[in-house]
């Protein structure tokens, strides 16, 4: 029997609240993921520059979470802004805000998707005369930003239910990075949603989390998040991925995605490609889970910029040197998995199977 979204909402209550918007005070507050799990600190984001910086510094990270944050960041562009008196001023400021937010990180498509959606809403509202003043426009933008959040949460529940069809009691799932509720802002997640719903239904499903060098999203965030939910998790080094699959310790690989192209190329955290190739070689199912807002049906694989971050992330671990300080470093933080290694892509609209170049459009544009 398949549960409904409403039934899941009654069954599963997220333990983490990574993004909080307060309508009364127009404040945006995020749980600072750069400090977890050692400190649980919430920070207020005051303006667009502040929001873009928090995304760039990964105080908020994960494709859907940066989309949601940027959506609210667009509203901050108009709040207490002395340069915005008319609706024309508002559109000008929002266009400027979009440029600033979009440039914060290059790989996840959700960022540009969310700022485009907010700017389009604002332009349509002004053109159609649906707002007579800036404060009315702000109110409509708040409704849209909340919709982005709510749609994301509902999509994660649907993905969780589709993913659950691939899990059996006693299974172990290998993941990569953190594609949980911290990464999506909702407390549920994409790749971790099936495991969380399995737990809520009384199944015993455990997770193997690679530490995910250099930023350690696996050891700091996935492990923390799953332990908070009471889900059994085992931390491994990134270099142990092959062995755990070879030794039959993994039934299923489930990862998130930052961008999925129309031919099925999946951009996700560095290390994902390796997991996919090994899983394919050993006959272990490999699924990418992402909402349709993470699809980019226009670009080609070589068009996508893979973010490279500070070399010191590799030369050190959380400030402690682990290499000669002047060593040359290459630090790409995403990789791309070719479609031939992917068993299926789980979205809120259903599971997409190969041939991806035919089936992605059919499902995503439905
Ligand atoms: O660099 P990050 O931590 O933002 O990277 C996050 C990932 O790669 C996630 O797997 C992806 O964004 C999907 S999140 C549901």
Image (spheres, grey):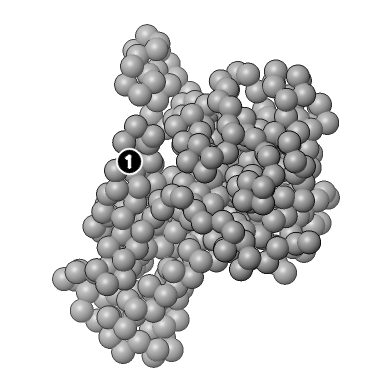
Q: Is residue 280 above or below residue 56?
A: above
Residue that lies at the very extreme toward the left in this rendered image: 82
Q: Is residue 144 above or below residue 346?
A: below
Height in image: 76 above or below 169? below
Image coordinates of residue 228 in percent, x first then y, are 47, 41
Q: Is residue 237 left or right of residue 323?
A: right
- Image spot of residue 239 (x, y percent): 60, 18
Assign a secondary structure to mark 1.
loop
Mark 1 — residue?
Answer: 40
How many residues crowd mark 1 within 10 Å: few (<14), some (14–19), many (20+)?
Answer: few
List x then y, in percent, for residue 131: 35, 87
- Which residue lies at the image location 45% right of the left edge and 81% below the top edge? 124
Total tally of numbered discs in the picture: 1
Mark 1 residue's CB less than 8 Å from ligand 1: no
Q: Nearer the viewer, residue 32 or 110?
A: 32
In this rendering, would 340 be left or right of 160? right
Quadrant position of the N terminus in the picture? bottom right
In the image, 291 versus 4, the foreground residue is 4
Q: Is residue 363 visible?
A: yes
The residue drawn where x is 39% and y is 34% is 37
Residue at the spot 76% in from the left edge and 55% down from the top edge: 351
Q: Quadrant of the C terminus?
A: bottom right
The residue nearer to you, when weighing 253 against 69, is 253
Visible residue check, residue 342? no
- 24 on left or right of 150: left
In the current view of this chain or complex, which residue is farthest to the front? 202
Q: Residue at x 50, y 49 (%)?
A: 181
Percent x, y for residue 362? 77, 64
Q: Is residue 306 above or below residue 314?
A: below
Q: Nearer the viewer, residue 122 or 46?
A: 46
């Amino acid at each position: 029997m398949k549960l409904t979204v409403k039934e899941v909402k009654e069954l599963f209550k997220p333990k983490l609240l990574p993004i909080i918007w307060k309508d009364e005070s127009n404040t945006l507050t995020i749980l600072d993921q750069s400090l977890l799990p050692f400190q649980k600190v919430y920070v207020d984001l005051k303006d667009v520059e502040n929001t873009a910086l928090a995304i760039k510094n990964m105080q908020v990270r994960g494709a859907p979470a940066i989309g949601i944050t940027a959506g609210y960041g667009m509203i901050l562009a108009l709040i207490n802004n002395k340069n915005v008196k008319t609706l024309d001023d508002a559109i000008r400021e929002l266009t400027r805000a979009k440029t600033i937010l979009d440039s914060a990180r290059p790989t996840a498509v959700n960022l540009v998707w969310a700022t485009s959606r907010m700017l389009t809403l604002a332009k349509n509202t002004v053109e159609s005369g649906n707002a007579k003043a800036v404060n009315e426009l702000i109110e409509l933008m708040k409704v849209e930003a909340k919709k982005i959040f709510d749609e994301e949460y509902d999509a994660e529940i649907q993905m969780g239910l589709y993913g659950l069809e691939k899990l059996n009691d006693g299974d172990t799932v290998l993941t990569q990075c953190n594609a949980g509720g911290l990464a999506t802002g909702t407390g549920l997640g994409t790749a971790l949603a099936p495991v969380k719903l399995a737990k809520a239904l009384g199944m015993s499903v455990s997770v193997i989390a690679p530490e995910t060098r250099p930023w350690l999203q696996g050891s700091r965030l996935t492990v923390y998040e799953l332990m908070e939910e009471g889900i059994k998790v085992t931390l491994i080094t990134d270099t142990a991925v092959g062995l755990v699959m070879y030794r039959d310790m993994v039934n299923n690989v489930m990862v998130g995605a930052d961008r999925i192209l129309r031919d099925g190329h999946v951009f996700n955290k560095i290390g994902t490609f390796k997991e996919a190739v090994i899983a394919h070689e050993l006959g272990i199912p490999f699924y990418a889970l992402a909402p349709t807002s993470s699809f980019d049906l226009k670009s080609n694989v070589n068009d996508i910029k893979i973010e490279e971050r500070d070399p010191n992330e590799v030369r050190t671990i959380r400030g402690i040197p682990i290499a000669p300080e002047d060593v040359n470093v290459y630090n790409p933080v995403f990789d791309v998995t070719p479609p031939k290694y992917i068993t299926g892509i789980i979205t809120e609209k259903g599971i997409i199977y190969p041939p991806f170049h035919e089936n992605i459009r059919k499902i995503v544009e439905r």
